[in-house]
Image (cartoon, rainbow, N blue to C red):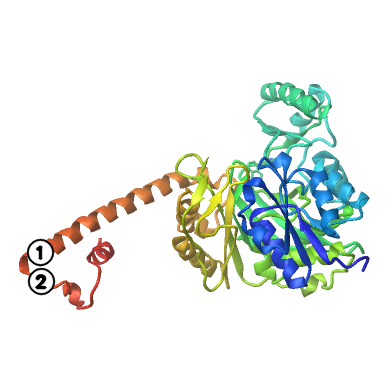
Amino acid sequence: MAKKITSILIANRGEIALRVIRACKELGIRSVAIYSDEDTRAVHVKRADEAYHIGPAPPAQSYLNMAKIVETAKMAGADAIHPGYGFLSENENFPQMCEKNGIIFIGPTAKAMDVTGDKMKCKVVMKKAKVPTVPGSDGTIEDVEKAADIAHEAGYPVMLKSAFGGGGRGIRLCKDEKQLRQEFEMASAESKAAFGKSALFVEKYLQRIRHIEFQLIRDSHGNGRHLFERECSIQRRHQKLIEMSPSPVVDQKTRERIGEIAVRAAAAVDYLNAGTAEFLRDPEGNFYFIEINSRLQVEHPVTELVTGLDLVKLQIHVAQGGEISFKQEDLKMNGCAIECRINAEDPFYDFAPSTGPVPNCNIPYGPGIRVDTYLYPSCTVSGYYDSLVAKLLAWGRNFEEARVRMRNALDEFTIEGINTTIPLYKTIMNEDNFIKGEISTDYLDRFKVFDKMNNEVKAEASKNAQAAVAAALLQSEFVKKGSPSQSSVNGNSQKISKWKMMRATI
Ligand code: MV4
């Protein structure tokens, strides 16, 4: 062990800050929170051992203010910083600044971040390491004629990508050469403005794909392990909505084969700490590596539920120089886990952000249910930060048990005052194609899931209205006959809400 970590500053907010605080408490590590003006009443501030105000609400002046955060860590005597996800988590200057100040960064090295952050650089390294990548150009392309040649060879349609894009930014679909030439000029101008060079590359376009990723952990002694896959195909505009493990299309042999490739990919960039190797899978079952995410991801609890491991504790162990204590063969996948990302967005109104006070909320629990959230009754959802307010997870011995638990937990979950993505997930949990595991990155459009959601909600409202009318009629009959409020309809002599009774029969 290089240096045992005794205190951690958490350079984040919301549910992930709480997640890291919990790991600290388990390990007897002092937790140091930071917060903006907007978060004075946030739970992470209350639960941490110490909390320091670092600036105004806008992230640029608080959670992204690297110098201020490092200064706060030194002032508080924290010996490590956990970046969470988002904010500074993938900024290679952050581990660098931490190192200069004698603070352990709980995450990858600046060098590994640099390589994984440049998709083309990363792809070149992967090709050398015999990691399968999408057919296309071998490096960035400066001129449009070369791009057209490569596209011709790969066959249209092709994808034009920026080496520095992310989350769907900087990717363009080109159906033919004419479109490629147009898009190339635009993309290249954009790229030059942003990065000073035309960092573009061409790939064969893969259709009806799934997004399947492998969780990785690697220590400073060169030990790397994969913690199986997560199926993340249900997305909207490159935002993941539902993740699960195992993937319905990954069998044990494939898991071992692609897992081994993912571990090799991590070794090829001398990766350190927790990361994720992202693959695209085509309908023929081919896997293509696309990138490594150099952070702990939002959906890491899915993997925790099926492996029984605590990824944040593992991260801390590895960051202080500890060796991974298990072999690949020691890991066993147990059951199935599904995660729904509950966002403060209106799925009936093109996912418009929905923020403000939450006067009350009811958070589900029960067998196999886990909720990672910063919500509490009378909290406020800020418009300054990302829209994720809770991660609802269901574990079951198999997919069906997890799915039913998820469906029931979604019914229990109420968040007053704001709109959320919960109604969409209720629809998906009962949707035939989802149940069959028939999902791809175009799942929502392909199966008209939003139409289904709208129809279900209308049908539900109509049933409720009918039940209300029927209950009122029934009540007036009783009144006429002078009946007591005891109902004997259906042979039931118990006191029962007439509305509930009618609702059950309509
Ligand atoms: C692709 C692709 C098809 N063919 N590359 C989108 C974000 C970036 N991480 C990779 N992306 C894609 N790259 C080739 N050659 C389709 C996508 C893509 C996608 C990938 C993963 C999850 C959701 C997606 C939604 C649309 C497009």
Please tell me whether mark 2 sits on a helix, a strand or a loop: loop
Marks 2,1: beta carbons within 8 A: yes
Q: Under 8 Å from ligand 1: the CB of mark 1?
A: no
Amino acid type at mark 2: Ser
Upstream in the sequence, badge 2 or badge 1? 1
Eyeballing the image, is 385 above or below 163?
A: below
What crowding class fits label 1: few (fewer than 14 Cα within 10 Å), some (14-19), or many (20 or more)?
A: few
Which type of secondary structure does the marked residue at label 1 adopt? helix
Q: Is residue 316 above or below residue 42?
A: below
Drawn side of residue 250 relative to residue 505, left or right: right
x and y percentages locating residue 174 in the rendered image: 67, 29
Q: Which label sits on residue 477?
A: 1
The part of the image, by quadrant, that contains residue 157 is top right
Mark linked to residue 483: 2
Residue 162, horizontal then vertical, whole percent: 76, 34
In terms of image quadrants, where is residue 212? Answer: bottom right
Name the residue rendered at 60%, 65% in the picture.
337
* Quadrant of ligand 1 in image: top right
Question: Looking at the picture, which amino acid does disc 1 mark?
Answer: Glu
